[in-house]
Image: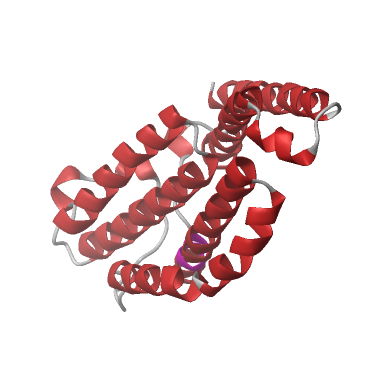
Amino acid sequence: MFLKISCAFIIVGFLIVTFSMFDILGLNSFDVIEEYFDNKSKKEIFRIQDYGFTALIIGFTIFALLKNGWKKFKTPSSTRKTFVLGIITLITTTFGLFAYVLFSILRSSGYESFIGDLKNSIDDIPMTFFPFVIWFIANISGINDDFKAGGLVKDLLFKSYNLWYSLVLVTTLILLVCFICIGNPWLTLMAILWSYLYISIMMGRQNSRIEKNIC
């Protein structure tokens, strides 16, 4: 079932993005660059296009994680893979926000403002990266010497949930739904990655507790 759902999202997303690109090219064929970015129809098309990209991200996520069904939904099989997932999440978050800001400037202000703000945006990357590094370290610290990575998500036990990870997971999932509703592909991808990271850490901590017969 999930495979069909993922294919549906991918097909719908691909069609939306494709048709929106045709609309953009059609509107732009008779406009100069400045008019291109001031056109209200263009902004609406960009908004629709974002929903298309969001659908593609959802589709590929479902395919990658749930193509074999919920009962076989797994977390990374080793501590190293969980840590790599965290690094990918951190990098994607930083450069995802960077890309989001740049595309917003490009769409709303045009090329001249884009080039002018590009350097400032690049200079701001360290300031954006640093807070997320702190957040990453605070959460990845849950991977300790007793961490036992891997397992099926369906086997997560309510009584073994860590309050902190449960809170940030629920908050991130709520944000994920909001990002999907507003059609923001960049923030949707980041929320998916952080959610999967939190679930992976919770799974590994639970496995450790089970091994010690605490659960």
Query: Is residue 33 in the magenta section?
Result: no
The quarter holding residue 68 reads top right
Considering every residue shown, the one lying at the far right of the view is 29
Quarter that holds the C terminus: bottom left
Residue plotted at (64% across, 25% down): 45
Where residue 123 sits in the image (x, y, percent)?
54, 74
The part of the chain drawn in magenta is 85-89
Considering every residue shown, the one lying at the far bottom of the view is 145
Q: Is residue 191 left or right of residue 201?
A: right
Q: Nearer the viewer, residue 56 or 154?
A: 56
Residue plotted at (32% across, 55% down): 203
The reply to whether residue 74 is visible in this rendering is no
In the depicted structure, whether residue 55 falls above or below residue 151? above
| Main SS category, magenta section | helix
In the depicted structure, whether residue 185 falls above or below residue 6? below
Where residue 206 sits in the image (x, y, percent)?
25, 57
Query: Is residue 88 in the magenta section?
Result: yes
In the depicted structure, whether residue 51 falls above or below residue 37? above
Q: Nearer the viewer, residue 103 or 207?
A: 103
Where residue 209 sits in the image (x, y, percent)?
21, 63
Q: Nearer the viewer, residue 193 or 200?
A: 193
The reply to whether residue 180 is visible in this rendering is yes
Quarter that holds the N terminus: top right
Where residue 147 sits in the image (x, y, percent)?
32, 70
Residue plotted at (45% across, 65% down): 86
Q: Nearer the viewer, residue 118 or 146?
A: 118
Residue plotted at (19% across, 67% down): 212
Q: Is residue 137 left or right of residue 74?
A: left
